[in-house]
Image (spheres, rainbow, N blue to C red):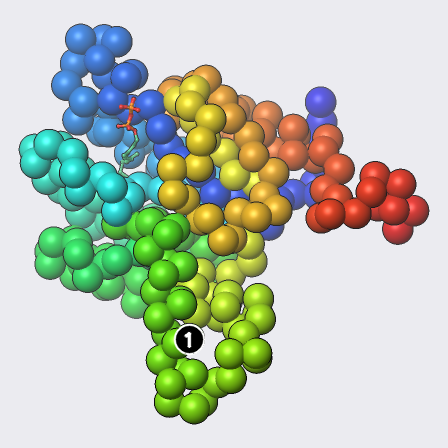
Amino acid sequence: MQLDKKNIPQHVAIIMDGNGRWAKKQGMMRLFGHQAGVETVKKIVEAARETGISVLTLYAFSTENWKRPADEVSGLMSLLKTYLKSELANMLKNDVQLRSIGQLENLPVEVRQVLEQSITETADNKGLILNLALSYGGRIEIISVAGQLAELCLKGELKPEEIDEKIFSSKLYTAGLPDPDLLIRTGGEARLSNFLLWQASYAEIYFTETAWPDFTKDDLINAVTSFQQRQRRFGRTGDQVAEK
Ligand code: FPP
């Protein structure tokens, strides 16, 4: 199946699952799987750029992941810091703009610092937007929007009846970004795990058995090709969409 260059999903979001099991299969520690996962991140960022994807959101650490064993959490934070430090030059060279969504205030200060520095230094880049979900949870994001809107109402700056999808979306971490068109989950599980709960309402979802460390550019292209074969109806009938 050929890739249709005129129908590339604008925003692709990925749940990078399967690192731990991939490592365990080889008799290695889970962190070995996360290390391999970082190499996949580098390859897929490059592949997304080459494919013409505009926004790539990667679920790197969830609000629930803090409950993992302390050494795995600190190992992941350390990998993140090293990745950000070592990839900044590449991001600048390849016109990648870094962004991040989540409860960033909960990240260790040294991770936050490199993250903020990379976000600032790449802010004017116009190529791929690489959006890292860190300490991210969809429910807490929605709760935070509810709180912000309630406060505006209390201050008399907003009326409850004025609240609509547009205002709601403007308070999400992803404000200004298009909703994901395609959501990929690697590693064989078929669930959303609290990822982009609001934003993924109309995303096409693609599950693959392939563990994240084994995920390649060809796998990304297969996911995009599968997306291109689907008819996005947004609540309409198939005939209505075909007539358009
Ligand atoms: C899920 O696999 C993966 C994570 C919780 C972490 C993902 C992190 C990386 C790929 C590396 C760091 C990211 C960046 C952006 C540099 P799992 O450990 O739950 O796998 P399992 O289901 O097989 O146990």
| Residue 227 placement (x, y as % from top left) | 65, 34
Residue lying furthest left: 71
Q: Please name the residue shown 50% across and 68% down the image.
A: 168
- Total marks shown come to 1
Regarding ligand 1, which quadrant of the image does it lie in?
top left
Q: Please name the residue shown 11% across and 58% down the image.
A: 109
Q: What's the amino acid at mark 1?
A: Leu
Does 232 appear above or below 219?
below
Quarter of the image where one finds residue 22 = top left
Q: Please name the residue shown 59% across and 25% down the image.
A: 222
Quarter of the image where one finds residue 72 = top left
In the image, taking residue 6 as reference, residue 158 lies left or right, namely left
| Residue 56 placement (x, y as % from top left) | 47, 47
In the image, taking residue 137 as reference, residue 65 lies left or right, namely left
In the image, taking residue 187 as reference, residue 222 lies left or right, namely right
Depth check, front residue: 136 or 53: 136
Depth check, front residue: 120 or 29: 29
Does 78 appear above or below 72?
below
Depth check, front residue: 205 or 222: 205
Does 242 appear above or below 25?
below
Residue that label 1 marks = 149
Rate crowding at label 1 as few (under 14), some (14 to 19) or many (20 or more) other CA atoms within 10 Å.
many
